[in-house]
Amino acid sequence: MAITRFTLRQLEIFATVVRTGQVKRAAQALHLSQGAVSQAIRELADALDVALFERQGRTIVPTAAARQLLQLTAAPMATLDDVAGQFGPAGPSQQLAGDIRLAASSTITRYILPAALAALRRSHPALSITVISGNSANVEERVAALDADIGFIEGPSQRDDLDAAAWGTDTLQIIAPHDYATDTVSIDALDMHPWVARERGSGTRAVFEQNLALAGYAAPRASLVIDDSGAIVRAVAAGAGLACVSRRAATRASSTSPAVQFIELTGLSLARPLWRVQRAAPGRAPLLDRFLGVLDIALADAR
């Protein structure tokens, strides 16, 4: 049987090309020439006798074989990368270095993560962190497709191929324009009022509708749909109707907008856990595990 030979360096270059989506960007990240990156990819593809990338316009996309290779080698590569760290000091004071890609729902990206990530970067300047924003469904898709190492969402995970764990809490808040007759709002007649809502796939919208259903009530029909919580608060402040958003979004966005009123409905719980999702695979990358540990500390300090 012929022995297939390839190098760890070729695998590192391959993973960087997948992550960056371009030979040029991978070359810049690795401090190599584009020719050296292209050659390494060709040699790896020849060694495995598979096509690793397909060109689509000006970009390249990994083939099914490339995605399988990435999944097969991610854990061993991470373990090898961490060999030196296993012989050095451990614990919260250990410096972290490397690239981390996060995907997070827009509410979490805007109102929860920034302060914690800023503090973390000050403590670990060798970390390079990229945050991609979208709704909860988008976040799960990116994590499953290897576009992100970890995802932060508001609603429970909707995918069986991801591991999910609760990592924090949030509270939703029903808001109304500052001059709205809030005494006319009752839980059994929500559809009698105009509503502004997030798009389908949003964790905020899903949790609001699920909690109403658990309380025995139908969700009101949205007359205006906006895919940003801050914009929803401003629309409500301008008189567009009622809305249910994160209390963080309502409090912070309304501080720079006309005031909004907070409405409390007896019998409706709007507390919700926040979820962290990762690919369901053995052997977590040590860097990612340590990153999550220090991020949890930074999030607690930022509250």
Image (cartoon, rainbow, N blue to C red):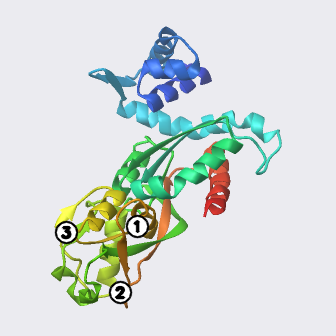
In this rendering, the answer to whether 178 lies above or below 288 is below
- Residue topped by disc 3: 222
Distance, label 3 to label 2, CA atoms, is 19 Å
- Residue topped by disc 2: 265
The quadrant of the rendering that contains the C terminus is bottom right
Observer-nearest residue: 62 or 43? 62
Give the label, 3 or 1, closer to the camera. 1
The residue located at (55%, 25%) in the rendering is 11
Mark linked to residue 250? 1
Query: Is residue 226 among the parts visible in the rendering?
Result: yes
Name the residue type under label 1. Ala
Query: Is residue 284 among the parts visible in the rendering?
Result: no
Q: Secondary structure at mark 1?
A: helix
Q: Secondary structure at mark 2?
A: loop
Tell me if 240 is positioned left or right of 14 in this view: left
Pick whichever of labels 3 and 2 is earlier in the sequence.
3
The residue located at (61%, 24%) in the rendering is 8
Q: Residues within 10 Å of mark 1 (few under 14, many from 20)?
A: many
Pick whichever of labels 3 and 1 is earlier in the sequence.
3
Q: Residues within 10 Å of mark 3 (few under 14, many from 20)?
A: some
Quadrant position of residue 191:
bottom left
Q: Position of residue 1 (x, y in %)?
A: 53, 21
How many numbered dots are placed on residues in this image?
A: 3
Give the label, 1 or 2, closer to the camera. 1
The reply to whether discs 1 and 2 touch (Cβ–Cβ < 8 Å) is no
